[in-house]
Image: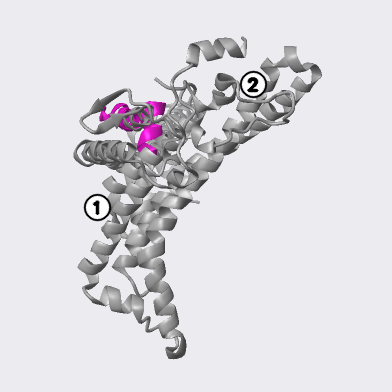
């Protein structure tokens, strides 16, 4: 089943040299992110702890939406009101406000990625899970690929070949700079956008998980080693306090990154519909 | 809890962590899980969650609109009722004023009538009394005149010592009195 949670890697593996070091750090940080041992296999595909967490995130999203929306009540409970306002926020605050009235049709996709990324990010903070599935490249890469396919498809569908020519030859720019701006636009739109979209999410969550694992893991390791190292175990208290601060900060990052990913997806779709802007 | 215990509980065979490059590349197993999980979520949202939220919000909108319309209607009704009542009160007041005015007029007419009647009656009584007094007076005068005439004749008979022709003498006396009255 693998390590219970990567937060406790230092404790689990007794890797930390508490006598000579001031913080525990693994030799290879990948150990904090990789769960390769399969629970079971379907043909060549291994089902790992990360696979399980990805499906768990999907189940949590479906559960939240199901219990939030199943009853068509005039006066919702607090939970129902929260879920409904979340859905309304994605539909009105992101889809309609960014893309325009025609943007409402993209709400199912925007809501799906928002909820999945949000839950995936907050897995970092969930007890016993303590691992954001978005700190693995699979989900960010796949979702930004879908976003890429959608906004390129929409661009050509709405504007035909002018989508490409208007991007490469922006008429609003003075002629002398037009080729340069066009080149930058082409590269940024068709090459950098999907990469930055995926990497922004992935890197933020990797950093967060790294910080939390090192701080909380070191904190626990040093405090538990109080018998061996005496007063030096106090370092553990400091690391743990920092870790708790980061914990709150990661809550903000998790929500913000989910919002940013969804918002940028909407912005990209909007610029494909109106490339002149 | 000692770290050895943790080791005992959690010691598992650990796959060797791969090189750092692999951290930024998606792993096939996770990619497949991610694709399947996303598709499940997307179809659930598309086929169930969106219709559900639209239904709920529409129902709520309808209910709120209905409530607002009801409130508007009730307000209008109340306004109409108020106007009706005000109208009725105004009517009643003017009717009351009319009644009072009428009553006042009737009372005045009655008063005038009564005064007139009382005056007429008083005048009647006075004139009747005056008439009676005059009658009485003339009757008394007549009697007095007869008495005076008789006395005068009696006196004259005694003075003369013989019976006078009473009838002729009476005529004479009357004539005399009449002359007195005239003179």
Write down the region rendered in magenta.
A57-86
On screen, residue A215 versus residue A109, left or right, reads right
Q: Please say if A179 is above or below A83.
A: below
A47 or A43, nearer to the observer: A43
Query: Which residue is at a point 29% across and 30% down the rendered structure image?
Result: A46
Question: Which residue is identified by label 2?
Answer: A220
Query: Which residue is at a point 37% across and 57% down the rendered structure image?
Result: A194
Spatial CA distance of label 1 from label 2 is 49 Å
On the question of residue A195 being in view, the answer is yes
Q: Please say if A68 is above or below A105.
A: above
Query: Which residue is at a point 40% across and 44% down the rendered structure image?
Result: A137
Residue A81, horizontal then vertical, whole percent: 38, 32
Residue B126, horizontal then vertical, whole percent: 43, 35
On screen, residue A277 versus residue B32, left or right, reads right
What number is the disc on residue A105? 1
Q: Are marks 1 and 2 on the same chain?
A: yes
Front disc: 1 or 2:
2
Secondary structure beneath disc 1?
A: helix
């Amino acid at each position: 089943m693998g390590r219970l949670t990567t937060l406790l890697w230092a404790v689990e593996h007794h890797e930390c040299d508490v006598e000579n070091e001031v913080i525990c750090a693994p030799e290879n940080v990948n150990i904090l992110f990789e769960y390769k041992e399969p629970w079971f296999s379907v043909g060549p595909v291994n089902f790992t702890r990360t696979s399980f967490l990805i499906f768990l995130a999907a189940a949590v999203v479906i559960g939240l939406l199901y219990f939030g929306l199943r009853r068509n009540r005039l006066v919702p409970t607090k939970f129902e009101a929260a879920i409904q306002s979340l859905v309304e926020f994605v539909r009105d605050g992101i889809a309609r406000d960014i893309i325009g009235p025609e943007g409402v049709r993209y709400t199912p996709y925007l809501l799906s990625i928002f909820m999945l990324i949000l839950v995936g990010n907050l897995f970092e903070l969930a007890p016993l899970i303590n691992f954001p599935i978005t700190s693995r490249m699979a989900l960010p890469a796949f979702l930004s690929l879908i976003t890429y396919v959608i906004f390129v498809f929409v661009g050509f569908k709405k504007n035909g070949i002018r989508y490409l020519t208007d991007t490469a030859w922006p008429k609003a720019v003075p002629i002398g700079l037009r080729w340069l701006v066009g080149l930058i636009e082409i590269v940024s739109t068709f090459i950098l956008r999907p990469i930055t979209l995926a990497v922004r999410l992935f890197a933020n969550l990797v950093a967060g998980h790294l910080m939390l694992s090192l701080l909380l893991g070191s904190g626990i390791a040093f405090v538990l080693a109080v018998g061996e190292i005496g007063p030096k175990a106090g370092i553990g208290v400091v690391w743990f306090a920092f870790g708790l601060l980061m914990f709150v900060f990661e809550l903000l990052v998790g929500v913000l990154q989910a919002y940013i990913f969804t918002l940028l997806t909407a912005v990209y779709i909007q610029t494909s519909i109106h490339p002149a802007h | 809890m000692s770290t050895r215990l943790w080791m005992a509980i959690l010691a598992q065979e650990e796959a060797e962590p791969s090189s750092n490059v692999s951290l930024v590349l998606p792993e096939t197993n996770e990619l497949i899980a991610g694709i399947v999980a996303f598709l499940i979520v997307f179809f659930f949202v598309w086929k169930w969650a969106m219709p559900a939220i639209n239904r709920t919000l529409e129902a709520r909108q309808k209910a709120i609109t209905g409530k607002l319309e009801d409130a508007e209607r009730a307000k209008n009704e109340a306004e109409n009722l108020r106007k009706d009542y005000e109208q009725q009160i105004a009517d009643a007041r003017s009717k009351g004023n009319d009644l009072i005015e009428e009553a006042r007029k009737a009372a005045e007419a009655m008063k005038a009538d009564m005064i007139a009647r009382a005056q007429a009656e008083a005048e009647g009584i006075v004139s009747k009394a005056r008439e009676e007094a005059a009658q009485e007076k003339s009757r008394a005068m007549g009697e007095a005149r007869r008495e005076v005439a008789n006395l005068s004749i009696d006196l004259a008979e005694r003075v003369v010592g013989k019976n006078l022709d009473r009838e002729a003498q009476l005529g004479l006396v009357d004539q005399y009195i009449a002359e007195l009255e005239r003179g």
